[in-house]
């Protein structure tokens, strides 16, 4: 099962990097979303893929009986999903606002903060 | 819970005694800004009280940080385990000398910025929400400095990142939106790489507690992909810290928000990256850090060179400051690259100096922009004749940033030069010297043209043309000049009496290089 997941995660990363390298901001954002999912799958595999039982403890016991699934990676993924989702939402709004105000969705053409050819700095006194 | 009813194997992992008052001190620096931030959000319709509440909150935060620093310096790392689970099972906050020192200086700088920004935030509606964001940024920064759990470090990074997005785009000017797109996307990618590395580290080592990783990393079978993980950490935090070649987002974005926000970012965000690099590559993965030292030496040298030359090539005051931040990061990376007692001491000292002086310089640049109407070297001028007191403060900050002797920049540069030369990296040592000369040239030009020249470009020698200058409003003058003056005074004080800061930095370096004491304290539970 793990090799299969490795291939899937690799495909996610490849697609994400391809999209992140493009100039249009919407494509970059889709790349960010894919990258977030690739990371979540990585975390999921980090907890080992097993068919073991849920980590429930019987009322009269102090420790679970038999091997159980690792619950920690799921907690990590839950945190990471919430965070990446909120960031994606923020960046989506920001991208729309940038398109409205700057009139372009091409990050190379956004040169307000760094104008092209600012000229040489003053040389003599 | 009755301790007798618990299986002994479980009981060993549970803290049954309530946390002592001293333990609560570890999380107090987090609780204060969260609560203050929440109160500020609730009072969002009463913005005129914001700056007072924010100043009180930051003063309390600074006091809590100082108390924690005293405790940590006197008694070793302070630990608080959450939810009664002993580390490594529970989440632990572990304050060591390094993190607490950084947190204390960060709180001092934030206080200066909050006082500086006070009047503007009240009068301009577009900066609505500045103080809540500032408090949440401080929560993230302090959390990152004090946590002992690497996944929590990621979470605190995200807290400070989303607050910094908010601060950067506040005002919604075109340049700010443009800058935030680039700043936001690149920093988000850096934290994502950090999360990938953390996932792989958990898969390899099976723990997220930094002290536990530092112990278990030595017992791993050969062939474990630790160097890959260390490289990913270097990539992620190198981007955060603006190390070459991942530094281009910094000069593209730091000059666009209000000067107070620039000062905050310059003081804290890149230093959090340096802190994380020190923690990961020196404390928890020392062997892999050494394996990567060829790369880190190159990165440190190239960052210094790019920053210094960049400062020379700019004509805008705040963009020059951005390149100075990058050159400073290069100097701090020498500590990561060489990773011995002397170089890490120098790097920590440099970080303290850089937080104070770069924040002061950005705030001073903001004052110049207000007086002269522009931070462009061609259009500003005549400040020395117009406001001699402020010009003196600016001169002190510029000299400190260049590393001239009576000010705070000199000592860490001398220490890093010595450490690099002693560790057999003469190239790095030379770069420290040459870059100081180049930065001195760049700042000398700033001082000549902004302070000494009688007016904007074209003013004849000896003539003064002060017509374009507007004085600061009288009710804002004190709140503008006092924070800048205090930061400059701190720089002079550290320059004249470097011993306390040096001792702190040396203690921080010892704590990083000898993880045994740190691990014993964290994993041993309550002392």
Image: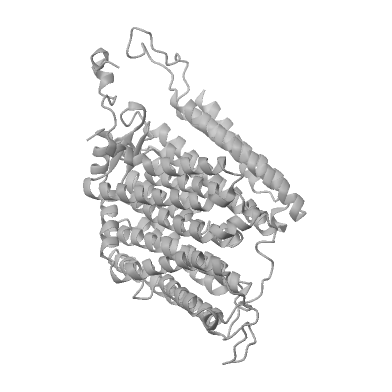
Front residue of B305/B77: it is: B77
Residue drawn where x is 55% and y is 26% of the image: A4
Instruction: Give percent across and percent down for residue A114.
Output: 65, 63
Q: x and y percent of residue A79 in the render?
A: 51, 32
Residue A90 placement (x, y as % from top left): 64, 42
Q: Is residue A30 left or right of residue B207?
A: right
**Location of residue B504 with respect to B496 vertically, above or below:** above
Residue at screen point 37% across, 8% down: A59
Q: Position of residue B331 (x, y in %)?
A: 40, 63
Comparing B518 with B225, the one in front is B518
Q: Is residue A63 above or below residue B184?
A: above
**Residue B282 left/right relative to B140:** left
Q: Is residue B353 left or right of residue A78?
A: left
Quadrant in which residue B517 is drawn: top left
Image colouring: one colour
Total marks in image: 0
Residue at the image position 30 percent from the left and 57 percent from the top: B505
């Amino acid at each position: 099962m793990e090799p299969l997941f490795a291939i899937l995660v690799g495909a996610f990363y490849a697609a994400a990097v391809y999209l992140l390298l493009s100039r249009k901001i919407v494509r970059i954002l889709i790349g960010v979303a894919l990258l977030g999912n690739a990371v979540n799958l990585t975390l999921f595999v980090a907890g080992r893929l097993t068919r073991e039982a849920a980590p429930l403890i019987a009322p009269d016991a102090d420790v679970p009986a038999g091997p159980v699934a690792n619950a920690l990676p799921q907690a990590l993924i839950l945190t990471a999903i919430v965070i990446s989702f909120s960031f994606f939402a923020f960046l989506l709004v920001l991208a729309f606002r940038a398109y409205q105000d700057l009139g372009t969705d091409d990050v190379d053409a956004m040169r307000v903060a760094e104008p092209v050819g600012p000229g040489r700095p003053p040389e003599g006194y | 819970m009755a301790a007798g009813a618990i299986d002994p194997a479980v009981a060993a992992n549970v803290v049954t005694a309530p946390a002592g008052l001293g333990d609560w001190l570890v999380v107090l620096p987090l609780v204060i800004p969260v609560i203050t931030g929440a109160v500020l959000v609730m009072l969002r319709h009463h913005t005129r009280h914001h700056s007072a509440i924010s100043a009180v909150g930051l003063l309390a935060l600074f006091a809590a940080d100082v108390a924690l620093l005293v405790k940590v310096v006197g008694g070793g790392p302070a630990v608080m385990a959450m939810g009664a689970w002993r580390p490594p099972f529970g989440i632990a906050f572990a304050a060591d000398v390094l993190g607490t020192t950084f947190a204390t200086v960060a709180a001092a700088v934030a206080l200066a910025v909050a006082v500086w920004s006070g009047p503007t935030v009240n009068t301009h509606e577009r900066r609505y929400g500045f103080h809540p964001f500032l408090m949440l940024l401080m929560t993230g920064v302090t959390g990152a400095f004090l946590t002992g759990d690497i996944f929590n470090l990621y979470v605190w990074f995200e807290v400070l990142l989303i607050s910094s997005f908010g601060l950067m785009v506040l005002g919604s000017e075109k340049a700010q939106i443009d800058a935030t797109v680039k700043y936001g996307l690149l920093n988000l990618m850096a934290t994502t790489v950090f999360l990938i590395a953390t996932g792989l580290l958990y898969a390899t080592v099976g723990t997220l507690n930094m002290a536990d990783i530092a112990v278990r990393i030595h017992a791993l079978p050969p062939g474990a992909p630790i160097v890959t993980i260390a490289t990913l950490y270097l990539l992620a935090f190198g981007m955060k810290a603006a190390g070459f070649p991942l530094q281009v987002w910094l000069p593209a974005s730091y000059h666009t928000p209000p000067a107070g926000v620039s000062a905050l970012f310059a003081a804290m965000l890149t230093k959090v990256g340096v802190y994380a690099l020190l923690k990961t590559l020196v404390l928890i993965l020392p062997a892999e850090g050494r394996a990567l030292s060829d790369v880190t030496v190159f990165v440190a040298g190239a960052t210094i060179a790019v920053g210094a030359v960049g400062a020379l090539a700019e004509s805008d005051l705040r963009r020059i400051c951005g390149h100075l931040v990058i050159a400073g990061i290069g100097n701090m990376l020498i500590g990561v690259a060489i990773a011995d007692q002397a170089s890490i001491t120098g790097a920590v000292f440099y970080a303290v100096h850089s937080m104070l002086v770069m924040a002061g310089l950005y705030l001073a640049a903001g004052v110049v922009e207000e007086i002269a109407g522009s931070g462009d070297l061609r259009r500003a001028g005549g400040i020395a004749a117009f406001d001699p007191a402020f010009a003196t403060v600016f001169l002190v900050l510029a000299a400190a940033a260049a590393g001239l002797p009576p000010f705070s920049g000199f000592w860490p540069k001398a220490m890093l030069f010595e450490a690099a030369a002693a560790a057999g990296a003469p190239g790095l040592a030379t770069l420290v010297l040459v870059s100081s000369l180049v930065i001195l040239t760049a700042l000398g030009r700033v001082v000549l043209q902004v302070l000494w020249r009688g007016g904007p470009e074209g003013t004849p020698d000896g003539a003064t043309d002060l017509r374009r200058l507007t004085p600061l409003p009288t009710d804002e003058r004190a709140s503008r000049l006092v924070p800048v003056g205090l930061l400059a005074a701190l720089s002079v004080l550290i320059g004249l009496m470097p011993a306390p800061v040096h001792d702190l930095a040396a203690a921080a370096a010892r704590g990083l290089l000898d993880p045994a004491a740190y691990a014993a304290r964290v994993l041993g539970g309550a002392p």
